[in-house]
Amino acid sequence: MTVCGALVIALAAFSGPRVHVPTETAVASKADLAHHPSLTYVYGSTSKVEQIIGDTDVQTKQPTLNQTQARYSIRGTDLGYSFEYNGQTVFLFGDTLGNTGGDVIGYSGSSDPNGPLALDFVTGDDGQYLRIEPPGVPMGGYEVPVSGIAVNGAMYVAVKSYVTIGQRTDTTVLTKYDDATKTFHAVRTLSRLPGGHFITMTMRLAPEGMPGLPTKEPYVLMFGSGDYRRSNAYLAAVPAATFESGVGTVYYAGRGGDGASWTQDESQAAPIIEHPTIGDISVTYVPQAGLWVALYDARTPRGIVLRYAQQPWGPWSEPQVVFDPETGYGTFIHDPFRKVDDGLAGPTIAEGRPPERVFGGFYAPYIINRFTEVDGDKITLQYVMSTWNPYVVVRMKTTLQLAR
């Protein structure tokens, strides 16, 4: 497959009046959730399915299916946000341990949630993996792709850039990818710190005519967070017809007595999920249940957290921890404080520190949409998760009980 279309890295701040949209579903209180479909984590159901990056699974010591180092010189990477494009699932990976560093694009035609996830990577004319490098947009360490979507036949990617450690300068940029020349072109700015609410994000298409949006036309929904692990979650909506230019972007500004409010001013956005330690967030829609589902990593409660809602602006359910990191440390995430070496150290991207002394992590729980399974009253989500040490990406699954 040739990955083509438009890679767009976007951030836009607009000013203007609020738009009021009457809709009964927008004003539901949290008490009303008791009368709506609900999801409950099936305790103990979360497990690692496979390691998808590297040549050897650090837990099992067996060869991985994808052999990314042997095939592409990709020894380690993180993130892996995915979306559908031209019949393939595209994966966007972050800072990469490889011949030339950078950020890389994988893709997969795998469709069986019970089978392996086979990955290939976009390469340049020299046969090396292609790096996401829009001219004039810094793509150094911690400057990474954070989301993507296919709109109007083009592929768009949200990328975090202009990162200065210890300062609040993070920005997203809009870039278009030319498949013929394998080059990037910067288009526009979307959001920036301080004050930006869409530094990490999920982008999803809303159904045409969905109640609660400013008009009946198709929209791209952007679920975002600002300062990393110091932010609530927010929602923006962009008409699909003008997604590239950003014209018509509105931000959810809260619920009133008879409907939802939207504003053109990002600084006036109201949180849809009040949880001020959100890091990377992923959102999907499960039509069989009529529910939006969010996964994100958080500091308190510590772990991978799930919430659900009938509308993208909520009200969202209370948090449920679906991955307790203590079940991963010493199993497939390195813990340097164990008395006996767990044998999980490395590769790492931390400079100047022995891998054995680098604490592993758990972040970027990005849902793989095509692998979502609904079987009666059970919903199984599959998602990737990054572990920092080893600096790889693993595929996870979690089962939820659906009650109507």
Image: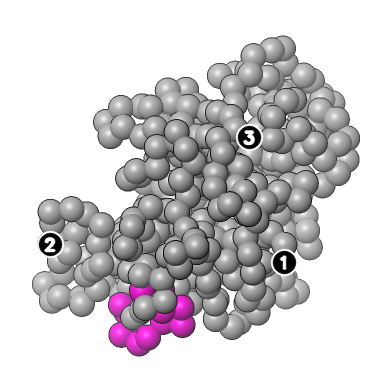
Residue 104 in percent (x, y) is at 46, 58
Circle 3 sits on which residue?
Answer: 235
Q: Which of marks 2 and 1 is nearer the N terminus?
A: 1
> Which amino acid lies under the numbered mark 1 shown in the image of this protein?
Gly
Q: Please determine whether, in this image, residue 287 is positioned above or below residue 197.
A: below
Q: Is the magenta stretch mostly helix, strand or loop?
A: loop
Question: Magenta stretch containing residue 233, yes or no?
Answer: no
- Name the side, left or right, on which 318 lies relative to 136: right
Quadrant the C terminus occupies: bottom right
- Name the side, left or right, on which 329 lies relative to 162: left
Q: Distance between the residues labelled 3 and 2?
A: 41 Å
Secondary element type, mark 2: loop
Q: How far apart are marks 3 and 1 (CA)?
A: 27 Å
Q: Nearer the viewer, residue 227 or 289?
A: 227
Residue displayed at 30% across by 77% down: 58
> Which amino acid lies under the numbered mark 3 shown in the image of this protein?
Leu
Q: Nearer the viewer, residue 348 or 24?
A: 348
Q: Which of marks 3 and 1 is nearer the N terminus?
A: 1
- Residue 328 lies in what quarter of the image? bottom left
Q: Nearer the viewer, residue 257 or 139?
A: 139
Mark 2 or 1: in front is 1
Residue 376, visible in the rendered structure: yes
Give the numbered dot on residue 354: 2
Secondary element type, mark 1: loop
